[in-house]
Image (tube, rainbow, N blue to C red):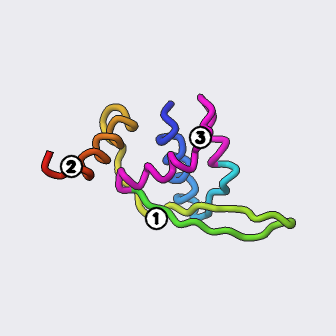
């Protein structure tokens, strides 16, 4: 149900097929259970968990289209993904505490 997991699993499926994930598809999947106004932020937050991806853009039918290719991923954390991302962000800001 979590948008991070939906996006991540979609990226993993495209990775397994060795093709790029169109931004339009990522957007739809990110908003499947609850609308995600800023799904690109959810994508960036995956990097906090150790995930990484490349982005490419190309002109198709007169429009710029964006694509994502997963390059690195890790296992999902136990429990709430959002809470783990916030915990890791806080730990990075305050490494001593």
Horizontal arrangement in the rendering, residue 78 relative to residue 46 (left or right):
left
Q: Classify mark 1: residues with Cα within 10 Å, few (<14), some (14-19) or many (20+).
A: few
Horizontal arrangement in the rendering, residue 90 relative to residue 34 (left or right):
left
Distance from the alpha carbon under mark 2 to that under mark 3: 30 Å
* Residue occupied by mark 2: 94
Say which element carries label 2: loop
- Report x, y in % for residue 93: 26, 51
* Residue occupied by mark 1: 71
Question: Is residue 27 found inside the magenta-colored segment of the image?
Answer: yes
Which SS type dominates the magenta stretch?
helix
Point out the stretch of residues depicted in magenta: 26-50
Horizontal arrangement in the rendering, residue 51 relative to residue 58 (left or right):
left
Q: Residue at x 62, y 39 (%)?
A: 37
Q: Classify mark 2: residues with Cα within 10 Å, few (<14), some (14-19) or many (20+).
A: few
Q: Residue at x 62, y 57 (%)?
A: 21
Residue 16 vs 40, above or below: the answer is below
Residue 2 vs 71, above or below: the answer is above
Give the number of the disc on residue 30: 3
- Report x, y in % for residue 48: 37, 52
């Amino acid at each position: 149900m979590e948008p991070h997991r939906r996006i991540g699993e979609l990226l993993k499926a495209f990775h397994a097929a060795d093709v790029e994930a169109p931004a339009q598809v990522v957007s739809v999947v990110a908003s499947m259970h609850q609308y995600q106004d800023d799904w690109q932020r959810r994508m960036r937050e995956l990097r906090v968990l150790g995930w990484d991806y490349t982005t490419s853009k190309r002109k198709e039918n007169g429009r710029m289209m964006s694509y994502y290719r997963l390059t690195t991923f890790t296992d999902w954390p136990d429990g709430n993904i959002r809470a783990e991302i916030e915990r890791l962000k806080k730990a990075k800001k305050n490494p001593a505490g």
